[in-house]
Image (tube, grey):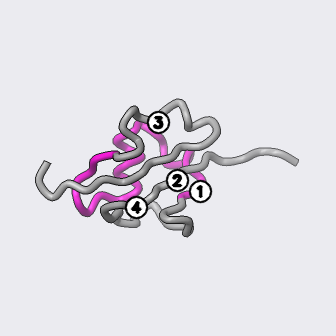
């Protein structure tokens, strides 16, 4: 993969079952967005409520950088 980057991917709660084996060094094309990662993992955008990159809340159109830590949380119910 030319222009390859690697991120640390962490899926939480009900999304954890979609975690790939290589999540600690997940390969992507440079310039990949969070939305493209969701599509690659077959996660519908409405199933990914909170997106954190390096501990900061980000949007679906954030372009990931080499070494980023991406955390994805599903909607949380309760009350």
Find out whether residue 10 is within the magenta segment: no
For marks 2 and 1, give the one nearer the viewer. Answer: 2
In this picture, residue 39 sits left or right of residue 75:
left
- Work out whether 62 lies above or below 16: below
Find out whether residue 30 is within the magenta segment: yes
Q: Mark 3 or mark 4, which is nearer the start of the sequence?
A: 3
Whole-percent x and y of residue 6? 30, 53
Helix, strand or loop under label 1: strand
Helix, strand or loop under label 3: loop
The residue at the point 48 percent across, 63 percent down is 53
Quarter occupied by residue 63: bottom left
- Which portion, as a residue range, is magenta? 26-51
Q: Which residue is mark 2?
A: 71
Mark 3 surroundings: few (<14), some (14-19) or many (≥20) residues within 10 A: some
The residue at the point 83 percent across, 45 percent down is 78
Whole-percent x and y of residue 27? 28, 47
Q: Mark 1 or mark 3, which is nearer the start of the sequence?
A: 3
Mark 2 surroundings: few (<14), some (14-19) or many (≥20) residues within 10 A: many
Q: Which residue is mark 1?
A: 50
Q: Mark 4 or mark 1, which is nearer the start of the sequence?
A: 1
The numbered dot on residue 19 is 3
Asked whether the beta carbons under mark 2 and mark 1 sit within 8 Å of each other, the answer is yes
The numbered dot on residue 31 is none
Q: CA distance from mark 3 to mark 1?
A: 16 Å
Asked whether the beta carbons under mark 2 and mark 3 sit within 8 Å of each other, the answer is no
Q: CA distance from mark 2 to mark 3?
A: 11 Å
For marks 3 and 1, give the one nearer the viewer. Answer: 3
């Amino acid at each position: 993969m030319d222009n390859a980057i690697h991120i640390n991917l962490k899926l939480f709660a009900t999304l954890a079952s979609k975690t790939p084996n290589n999540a600690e060094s997940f390969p992507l094309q440079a310039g990949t967005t969070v939305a493209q990662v969701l599509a690659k993992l077959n996660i519908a955008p409405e199933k990914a409520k909170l997106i954190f990159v390096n501990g900061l809340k980000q949007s679906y159109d954030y372009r990931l950088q080499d070494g980023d830590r991406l955390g994805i949380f599903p909607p949380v119910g309760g009350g």
